[in-house]
Image: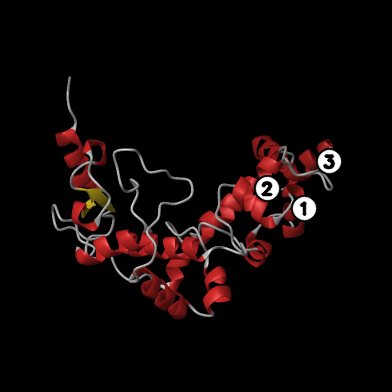
Amino acid sequence: MIYAEIQRAARKGRTYRHFRKRVMTRNRFQLTRVSGQPVSDAEILADLKSVASKLNATTVSQPQYRQSGRYDDTTVARRFGSWNKALLAAGLTLSNEVNISDERLFENILTLWQHFGRQPRRSELAGAPSLISQSPYNRRFRSWTAALEAFTTYANGTGNEAPPRHETVEARHSTTRDPSIRLRWKVLQRDRFTCCGCGASPALNPGVVLHVDHKKPWSEGGETIIENLQTLCSTCNLGKSCMTTVTP
């Protein structure tokens, strides 16, 4: 059969080199997945991450994966026990977690507010640094606007500032080291989401990261009260840490 093709090529005035190139190209080895071959966990997780990257999101819903993923979403959920377990195994955030506490929902809103230096938009729940998608907010508060109203009512309130269950107050302190949601909100609001050191704000300078910092360090007996807290950007906070570090 190859000899016949050589003759046909010769009749058309083509060289043997041309014929050999065409045959070699046509017969080049190609790797294809055998039908029915099982997919590894690593391949599934890599594809989940790939879809999230294409969506520029920290999570992927099953309808989104059904549209853009390589594998069947029910296979993914069955392989890892549930869709949410697959997301966690891929290092992504949960897309449809239920029974999330109000405190976690409000903490996520404050994280976004602090990150952007302004009221967060609903669309920003789909990207970093948000850890919760919009669905839990819609289930709990019916709308994003209502969720923001509930958050500001809570954050501006004067509720119990007791330490979280996992924290204990050290003997020489009357407060815990980490400020509560309410306290962080009040400090950031007082300082207009602007660094007290250099005046930078993420609302005007994208990429600026704000921290709520102790004026008198916690390690030196400073308490976690609004009078001893200030808003600093990461650069000023690092500089302050360097200045207060005792060198041997």
- Residue 46 position, x and y percent, is 61, 46
Comparing labels 3 and 1, the label whose residue is closer to the camera: 1
> Foreground residue, 146 or 217?
217
Give the residue at x 25% y 61%: 187
- Considering the image in quadrants, where does the C terminus appear? top left
> Foreground residue, 102 or 234?
102
Tell me if residue 242 comes above or below residue 177 in the rendering: above
- Residue 175 position, x and y percent, is 32, 48
The Cα atoms of the two marked residues, 2 and 3, are separated by 47 Å
Three-letter amino acid code at the position of disc 1: Arg
Reading the chain from its start, which is encountered first: label 1 or label 2? 2
- Considering the image in quadrants, where does the N terminus appear? top right
| Labelled disc at residue 4 | 3
Reading the chain from its start, which is encountered first: label 2 or label 3? 3
Dot 3: element: helix
Three-letter amino acid code at the position of disc 2: Ile
| Labelled disc at residue 78 | 1
* Mark 2 crowdedness (10 Å alpha carbons): few <14, some 14-19, many ≥20: many
- Residue 112 position, x and y percent, is 38, 62
Do the residues under discs 3 and 1 have CB atoms within 8 angstroms? no
The Cα atoms of the two marked residues, 3 and 1, are separated by 54 Å
Give the residue at x 68% y 56%: 83
* Mark 1 crowdedness (10 Å alpha carbons): few <14, some 14-19, many ≥20: few
Give left or right: position of 135 versus 153: right
Comparing labels 2 and 3, the label whose residue is closer to the camera: 2
Dot 2: element: helix
